[in-house]
Image: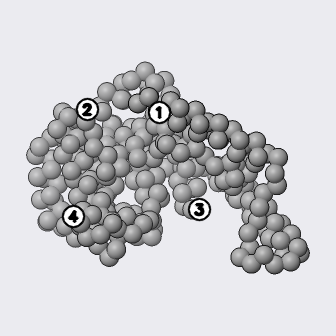
Amino acid sequence: RKLWPWMCKVQRIFGAVRLFASLLLPPIYFSGDAGTNDDLQANKRNYAGRLAQEKHAWRAFVRSLRPSSVPTGHGRGVVVVGGRDHGKASDGPERTGGHGGRAYYTLDALLGIAALRWTGCMLPVELWHDHEAIFLGATGREVATVMGSVGGKVKLRDFHELPGGSDWQGFQLITKAILHSAFAEVLYLDADVVPLLNPSGFFTSPVYTHAGAVFWRDFEQVLYENPIWQVIGVRPTLMWDTDSSQLLINRTRHWRPLALCDYFNERG
């Protein structure tokens, strides 16, 4: 506890040094082999051209947005994504039933929902999955009934029922689940988030009612060499990353930035 403030101070100093260096030093461009100076200059031009294309593309996307572009929702609820981890290899079969070398989060999600009910939270829940057999047909209806019998309603949602849903993976699933949720106001929780207190009060908290969204800070800072700064046309600044493990958002108020976030997730 005593070391934590010092660690934060060191990290802020380190971040400031990196920002200073990133503003003074030219970016480094990699092209596999070192190559000739002409190769490096060509790679630099290609890199700058790609960033300019991305900058133009997202702005055109925003201009094309209409309220009808985003599905509407009603009421408040919790959104959880289960299924397999598309991004990294499993720690092993003991990692909640890892399949095909990938971690498996559905059991984590079920335990998280149980913990949510244990806190007294009766908000309806959507559990999203990637076409898992146990959640399909009569078996799926039975699972939903059993889960709903210990608290609020639980609805199973299949990504594969949406156009292109079988191709979504990783962080794309978060914005897709929120955008296509039946709720207008969403508390998103990662499968491995275990609530210790009833989170329902977040919906009536002053910060949420004022801003229409609540985000939690991550442990990492946004890298100054991250190309996103150039894509969005903002000078690199010292700021913390946002933890996507949990977030609270009013889709009705913030459908446009939510759609843009989904756009960037699709672009990788």
- Reading the image, the residue beneath label 3 is 267
Which of 156 and 227 lies nearest the eye of the viewer?
227
Q: Amino acid at mark 3?
A: Arg
Which of 24 and 146 lies nearest the eye of the viewer?
24
Q: CA distance from mark 4 to mark 2?
A: 26 Å
Which of 149 and 30 lies nearest the eye of the viewer?
30
| Residue 198's disc number | 2
The quadrant where residue 141 appears:
bottom left
Residue 259 locus on image (x, y percent): 54, 49
- Reading the image, the residue beneath label 4 is 135
Q: CA distance from mark 3 to mark 4?
A: 29 Å
Residue 217 visible from this viewpoint: yes
For marks 1 and 2 on the same chain, the one whose residue lies earlier in the sequence:
1
Q: Which dot, 4 or 2, sits closer to the camera?
A: 2
Q: In what quadrant of the picture does the C terminus appear?
A: bottom right
For marks 3 and 4 on the same chain, the one whose residue lies earlier in the sequence:
4
For marks 4 and 2 on the same chain, the one whose residue lies earlier in the sequence:
4
Q: CA distance from mark 1 to mark 2?
A: 28 Å
Q: Amino acid at mark 1?
A: Trp
Q: CA distance from mark 3 to mark 1?
A: 36 Å
Q: Which dot, 3 or 1, sits closer to the camera?
A: 1
| Residue 4's disc number | 1
Residue 261 locus on image (x, y percent): 55, 50
Check disc 2: other Cα within 10 Å, few if <14, some if 14-19, many if 20+: some
Local secondary structure at mark 2 = loop
Q: Amino acid at mark 2?
A: Asn
Q: Amino acid at mark 4?
A: Phe
